Image (spheres, rainbow, N blue to C red):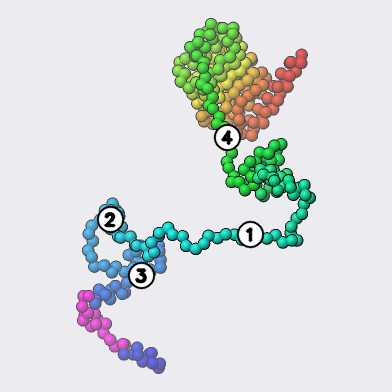
Amino acid sequence: MSSYQKELEKYRDIDEDEILRTLSPEELEQLDCELQEMDPENMLLPAGLRQRDQTKKSPTGPLDREALLQYLEQQALEVKERDDLVPFTGEKKGKPYIQPKREIPVQEQITLEPELEEALAHATDAEMCDIAAILGMYTLMSNKQYYDAICSGEICNTEGISSVVQPDKYKPVPDEPPNPTNIEEILKSVRSNDKELEEVNLNNIQDIPIPMLIELCEAMKTNTHVRSFSLVATRSGDPIANAVADMLRENRSLQSLNIESNFISSTGLMAVLKAVRENATLTELRVDNQRQWPGDAVEMEMATMLEQCPSIVRFGYHFTQQGPRARAAQAMTRNNELRRQQKKR
């Protein structure tokens, strides 16, 4: 028998119950704490199962997050800042570094002709920059300086080779002037079938009342002189699209219609496309850039309309589906070829 086994033999006949009866409450609590199974390395467990409860304080109540934050902020404000061991006085010590001049060895020195030596000795930084660009030394300058020196016939790099790259200064583009069209006068001219009025351009006028636009479309039904009708960016919706569709069914003089950049839905576009089939004089139609994508059914209807309307030779819309795009391109090619043959005759 080994010495370890002999050491354990004296604990064989110990009465555990008798020992537990003699322990005090504090010793029993300490024993219970030691016997608890904890897993301190498992971060997925809550804190109560990773570490034994070592506090004797009774709970003060539910957690008050705002009060806790205020207490932490107040405690942080009351802590004094640590004083610097060496206060900063702004004094600079030591000597600034000066890069030593490198003497060019004799074998690396290049000797030019006297005329070139004299010309380079008196050349300005701008002239040296242009010379470097001509010789292809683009690493000595910025891309803008390099391409300006190559494309321009004059010396334009006045900053020199060691200049700081500056951003290009672009000229501000002024906004388009507001549309000066008087809607009431245009409506009167359309109603009276004025011979001098051949174009109605209401582009970018966003405060036109819907009833007035509908009246304008009603007046266009009997007009025989207007050739171009444009309602780009007028905030037109489906009611205006339906009025335009009714106008196309009766008007026989309009050649160009533009309703781009509006709020027309697929229902309104479908009404316009169906009305175009009943119009044989319209040659140009633009309906792109609406507030929402019209959908596959509308794009298929556009392709069908172009196939059935040989008079349409210009159509403004960006197709998203390959099938309708291919059909529309083929139909437009055929329509333009038919128009070219008609002009030959």
Quadrant of the rendering where the C terminus is positioned:
top right
Q: N-terminal of the two: label 3 or label 2?
A: 3
Quarter holding residue 196: top right
Kind of residue sitting beneath label 2: Gln
Residue 293 vs residue 91, the one in the foreground: 91
Residue linked to disc 1? 101
Give the percent coordinates (x, y) of residue 68: 28, 55
Name of the residue lying farthest toward the right: 113
Asked whether residue 267 appears in the rendered view, the answer is no
Q: Which residues are magenta?
A: 11-26
Q: Residues within 10 Å of mark 4 (few under 14, many from 20)?
A: few
CA gap between label 1 and label 2 equals 59 Å
Residue linked to disc 3? 38
Q: N-terminal of the two: label 1 or label 4?
A: 1
Q: Residue at x 63, y 24 (%)?
A: 315
Asked whether residue 235 appears in the rendered view, the answer is yes
CA gap between label 4 and label 3 equals 70 Å
Q: Mark 2: which secondary structure?
A: helix
Residue linked to disc 4? 170
Quadrant of the rendering where the N terminus is positioned:
bottom left
Residue 199 vs residue 319, the one in the foreground: 199
Q: Residue at x 31, y 74 (%)?
A: 35
Residue linked to disc 2? 74
